[in-house]
Every structure is written in C-alpha cells, then in structure tokens.
Image (cartoon, rainbow, N blue to C red):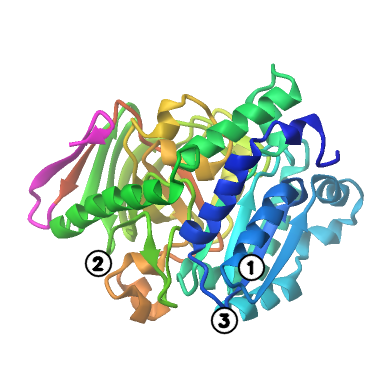
Amino acid sequence: MTFHSPAHQAVDPVKLDKLAEVAVKVGLRLERGQELVITSPIAALPLVRLITRHAYIAGAALVSTFYSDEETTLARYRYAPDESFDRATDWLYDGMAKAYGKNAARLAISGDNPMMLAAQDPAKVARANKANSIAYKPALEKISNFDINWNIVSYPNPAWAKQMFPDDPEHVAVEKLANAIFTASRVDVEDPIAAWAEHNANLARRSSWLNAERFSALHFTGPGTDLTVGLADGHEWHGGASTAKNGITCNPNIPTEEVFTTPHALRVEGHVSSTKPLSHQGTLIDNIQVRFEGGRIVEAKATNGEEVLKKVLDTDEGARRLGEVALVPHSSPISASGVLFYNTLFDENASCHIALGQCYSKCFLDGASLSQEQIKAQGGNSSLIHIDWMIGSGEVDIDGVRPDGARVPVMRKGEWA
C-alpha cells in the first residue's frame, strides 16, 4: 500500500498535524537539545514524518525511528526455526536503554493490527513475548521508573480500522477510526494545547483529592465483582501530566482519562470480572474472571482466550499480582463513543481498570528517590509484563477504605461520587 492510497487520504491532514504537535508539545514537552527515539508501525509513516518535523522545530538534537511491519513479523511465525522464538534483539534494547540513560525522550506510535497474531501458535507467541520482555527490561525500567519524558499516540492503520469497522470499505473505516482517535486525543478542537491544559487540571484535582484521603484500600462491587485492592504503603495518585525524574512534565498517554496508583502486591482479595474484552497479541480475551488470595491470582478463566490468559499469568511470579489500579468515569468520551478499539491505550480509558505485573515507581511518595528494594518493601510489584484490563462499568461501585475501616464513596454506578 502506498501512502497516497484512498485509506491514507481519508485521514484529515490538518488534524493529523495537530496530533503530531500535541505529541511533541503536550505528550513529550520535548526540550531543546534532547534526542528522541520513536517506535512505529511502518503504516504510520505519515504521522512519523509530522512528529519528526515538530520535534526538530522544538529543538530536538536527533530523531531516530525504528519501524515494525506486519508482513515481516508474520514471516517469522511462518518460516523461522523453532529456536527463533526464544530470541530477541537485546542489542537494540540495550542501545535504547543507553539512549534513555543519556536523557533521550521516547515516543511510541500505536496502531498495529490487533489481530495480527490471532492465527499463530499461542505457545510461540508466548515464548517470543517472554524473550522480548526479558531483552526489553533494561529499557522498560527507564520508562516504568519514569526516568525520562515519554509518550504514546496512535495512528489509524487500515488493518486496525477494518478490525473495528469490518462492514465498511477500507477508506471509510480508516476515516471513522481517525476521527475517533482525533476526538479522544482532543485534537479536533481549535486549540488542542489549551484543551489539554484544562483536562490536565481536572485530572490533577481528582488525584489531589485521593491523595488527601490516604485510603488504605479500594473496594469494588458489581456484577461478578467483590474485590478489595489494598494500596501500597506510601502510594501516590497521578493523572494526566506528571513530572519525570529528568524534571520534564509530560503526558505519557494520549488519550488519557484515568487517575491511577500502585496496589499492594500482597493485599488484594476477592473476585473480579472483566467488563470489556482484552485484546492481547492477536487474541481477544473475553469475560475474564479471576480470584485473588494474598494478592495473587489463584483462579482464572475466560470464555474466550483462556489459554492465552493463563500463559500470560505464568510469565513470572509477578504476573499474577497487580501493578496498577486506575479510576475512569463510565461517562468518559471513549466510553461514551460505544466503540471497542481493540487497543488497550484507548479501551483502558473507557473504564476503571487494573493491570497485571510491573508497578510504576512514580506512584509512590518520593518515588524518584526509592530503590527497587524499598519499592518492593512498600508493596510494589515487579514483573516482565504490564497488562491492563477493564473492570469498571455503569454498574460498579467503589468505596475508599480508610486505615480505621471507615468507608468513603468514591464512585457510584461508574461515576465520581
């Protein structure tokens, strides 16, 4: 497919340029003299070019982009020898970690076909993911520890668009997805920068209230859910713009509707059911139901994708524990759209959610100064994975539990109380 095809022409160039500008000025807040590392599907080349232009205008010292491609990814599963699936490009990730260690910013463009690996051997997919996670860990730690300013935005890849809107011609599907991305990313307004400033202020107010309450736990109740999520000692709520250890205040996720913090890895009890499907590495995992004891998932099932779910949970010890809990009102713009994006960046912002695996060190008071041992001692989880899945809806209530056991309504029927 050329980049002059009807599908790509269906993307509004003015709004795409606004998205690129927001990625640099709001998402990254790139500083003059910083290098920028971009990862992107090759289908998102039009957005990469615009982001690169805005990055250099902002004073970037160097922009380096690494592309992925669906056909070359699938070629590995079709033709590579079996031992290939226990290998990963550790040399590349070592280089990225070195770049981040020298204060390079990082930007990821999301937009892969969510069902790209749906027809591949789940065991090979799991092995490749594990090898990749191990190799990526040195670079991922720079991101999860919030050492640098980083950001994720999305591009309407035609394969992704057709997954969402299968009954429409490709160019119509792309236009629908593009418009949904632009709306969720707040770039379909006259002044996106001002819109983001107002949105960040609203999320900051929510975070400040939660931080002032100092809850010891959250209690979720709803259909198929009775879950108590203990919160890590010295946890801190964040939402919207946050300041990285390098001193730059950035918006890591565009879009974002959540306020989030770190659960205590050993203090999660009860059962919970997913309220939206989880699209993971080409598999749609639906109707997830798990039970926690002592912070660990001891039972797990799903009506679809159960085998993949269980392989994820067996990644390592931390994969069965929580690294994040996030609150999103049911009336969020992404939820109100009624669209399933098959993309966690969007779907997690339609619903309250929890994440299996690695915690964020920034979600602790004075997190920048804490060692990994201190984070663990305060309840932070460690894992090779970080996978969000949705547990909120218009039927879910949430109470904040104070250390003395007193309860405070936080959400009622999916809305802030």
Query: Which label's residue is closer to the chain start, 2 or 3?
Result: 3
Quarter holding residue 262 = bottom left
Residue at left offset 39%, top offset 79%: 373
Residue 216 coordinates in the image, percent (x, y)? 19, 57
Residue 227 or 133: which is nearer the viewer? 133
Q: Is residue 412 left or right of residue 83?
A: left
Of residues 317 and 207, which is closer to you in this image? 207
Residue that protrudes farthest toward the top in the picture = 167
Q: Residue, x 18% and y 53% (percent of image)?
A: 209
**Residue 300 visible from this viewpoint:** no
Residue 76 relative to residue 157: left or right = right
Region of the chain picked out in magenta, as a range: 402-417
Q: Please indicate, yes or no, whether residue 93 appears anywhere in the rendered image.
A: yes
In which quarter of the view is residue 264 placed? Answer: bottom left
Whichever of labels 2 and 1 marks the residue nearer the N terminus, that label is 1
Element type where label 1 sits in the image: helix
Task: Locate residue 347 relative to residue 47 in the image: left or right.
Answer: left
Is 171 displayed left or right of 362 in the figure? right
Residue identifier under label 2: 233
Question: CA gap, disc 2 to disc 1?
Answer: 42 Å
Q: Earlier in the sequence, mark 3 or mark 1?
A: 1
Quarter that holds the C terminus: top left
Residue 159: horizontal and vertical position, in percent? 73, 34
